[in-house]
Image (cartoon, helix red, strand yellow):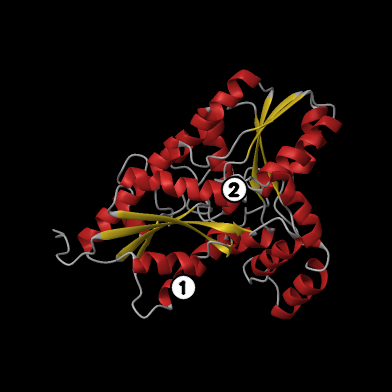
């Protein structure tokens, strides 16, 4: 029988991690952010020389000015939406957990950096850290980057902290319930004809590499209709699982479509493309469209500008008569409750075992995320 540690640290850190945001909507800050964000082997899976040529020779000379203009359209008085909502979420989770827990928000690119947040946790007498990637499904370009940065930063310290990581929670009941709680007050008065569930896209090779030698991967129309042993590591299948659960929870089980947004570069990306799906829905007679982006947990450029502004403009041009973007979970109280519950459970197991444990060891609470392998 496991016994509690007698020398366990008095405080537990909780690190909420997302992919990042520029410090300001000025072109120079956006350029610095894009350089850090894109010059990563996971983000652009190509030989180093080719990635450097693309980032420094093609993207950085031209894209920062355009991206800065887009950021200015969504910037809040207190800063980037992603940073503002991330810090609010950390504060809300911290209020629920109490003084024993130190909850902080960090990003892989931009600030607050993971290095700075881990240093703050170290000086706060934190011995164990529960890492919560704010990225429900697993993708190498999302959770993969976040966890690599956390492990690298933690492992570089003379006294590395013990860590546990909340596993992918794309179909966790607490997550789905929180999505429904935020979406329902928007959907009910709007009375949408159809629900579009838009996820961040990834290149097809990211999916095939994560699944392995599956003969059905991206070869059959129904390849992502269910999660099983063959595709349980597939990002696309996980997104479809989220959409099924979410659409059912908000009463749109037979009136929803899955799509993928935010394409970059010339590689083949997973389909269907959000910008292609919307005109198709309009041609099918949909007039009032609601769009949800459930794997973006914090509102950001991709939700507020790409969908909320440009997506709405495209829908209007297609003849649509109504368009609504469902907000992300952000710092919604029900979502803060879920994260606090997960953090308590991970901390309890780590304390009982006396060290960092595998994420697969945790998950007995009803709304805790299940390990998927």
Residue 215 in percent (x, y) is at: 62, 57
Q: Which residue is more in the foreground, 259 or 142?
A: 142
Q: Secondary structure at mark 2?
A: loop
Residue 339 in view here: no
Residue 202 in percent (x, y) is at: 66, 56
User: Which of disc 1 and disc 2 is earlier in sequence?
Assistant: 2
For label 1, the residue is 153
Query: Which residue corresponds to the image point at 31% horizontal and 64% vertical from the top-left?
Result: 126
Residue 326 in percent (x, y) is at: 62, 33
For label 2, the residue is 78
Q: Establish if 72 lies above or below 355.
A: above
With 183 as the anchor, is 30 left or right in this view? right
Query: Which residue corresponds to the image point at 71% horizontal and 38% vertical from the top-left?
Result: 308
Q: Which residue is more in the foreground, 240 or 81?
A: 81
Q: Residues within 10 Å of mark 2 (few under 14, many from 20)?
A: few
Give residue 52's mark: none
Residue 170 in percent (x, y) is at: 50, 46
Residue sitting at the far front: 77
């Amino acid at each position: 029988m496991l016994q509690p540690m007698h020398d366990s640290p008095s405080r537990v850190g909780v690190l909420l991690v997302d992919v990042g945001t520029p410090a300001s909507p000025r072109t120079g800050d956006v350029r610095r952010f894009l350089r850090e964000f894109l010059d990563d082997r996971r983000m652009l899976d190509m030989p180093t020389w080719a990635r450097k040529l693309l980032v420094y020779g093609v993207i950085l000379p031209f894209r920062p000015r355009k991206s800065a203009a887009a950021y200015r359209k969504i910037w809040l008085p207190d800063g980037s939406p992603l940073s503002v909502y991330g810090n609010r979420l950390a504060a809300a989770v911290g209020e629920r957990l109490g003084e024993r827990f130190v909850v902080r928000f960090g990003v892989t690119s931009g600030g607050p950096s993971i290095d700075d947040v881990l240093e703050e946790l170290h000086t706060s007498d934190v011995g164990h850290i529960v890492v919560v990637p704010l990225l429900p499904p697993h993708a190498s370009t999302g959770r993969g980057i976040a966890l690599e940065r956390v492990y690298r930063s933690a492992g570089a310290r003379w006294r590395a902290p013990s860590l546990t990581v909340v596993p992918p929670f794309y179909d966790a009941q607490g997550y789905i319930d929180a999505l429904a709680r935020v979406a329902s007050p928007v959907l009910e008065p709007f009375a949408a004809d159809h629900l579009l569930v838009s996820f961040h896209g990834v290149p097809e090779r990211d999916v095939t590499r994560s699944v392995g030698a599956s003969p059905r991967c991206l070869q059959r129309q129904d390849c992502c209709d269910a999660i099983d042993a063959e595709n349980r590591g597939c990002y696309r299948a996980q997104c479809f699982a989220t959409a099924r659960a979410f659409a059912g929870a908000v009463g749109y089980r037979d009136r929803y479509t899955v799509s993928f947004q935010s394409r970059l570069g010339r590689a083949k990306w997973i389909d269907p493309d959000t910008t292609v799906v919307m005109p198709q829905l309009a041609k099918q007679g949909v007039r009032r469209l609601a769009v949800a982006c459930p794997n973006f947990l914090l509102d950001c450029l991709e939700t507020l500008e790409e969908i909320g502004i440009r997506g709405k403009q495209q829908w209007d041009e297609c003849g649509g008569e109504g368009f609504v973007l469902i907000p992300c979970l952000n710092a919604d109280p029900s979502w803060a409750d879920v994260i606090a519950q997960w953090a308590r459970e991970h901390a309890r197991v780590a304390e009982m075992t006396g060290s960092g444990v595998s994420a697969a060891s945790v998950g007995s609470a009803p709304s805790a995320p299940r390990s998927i392998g």
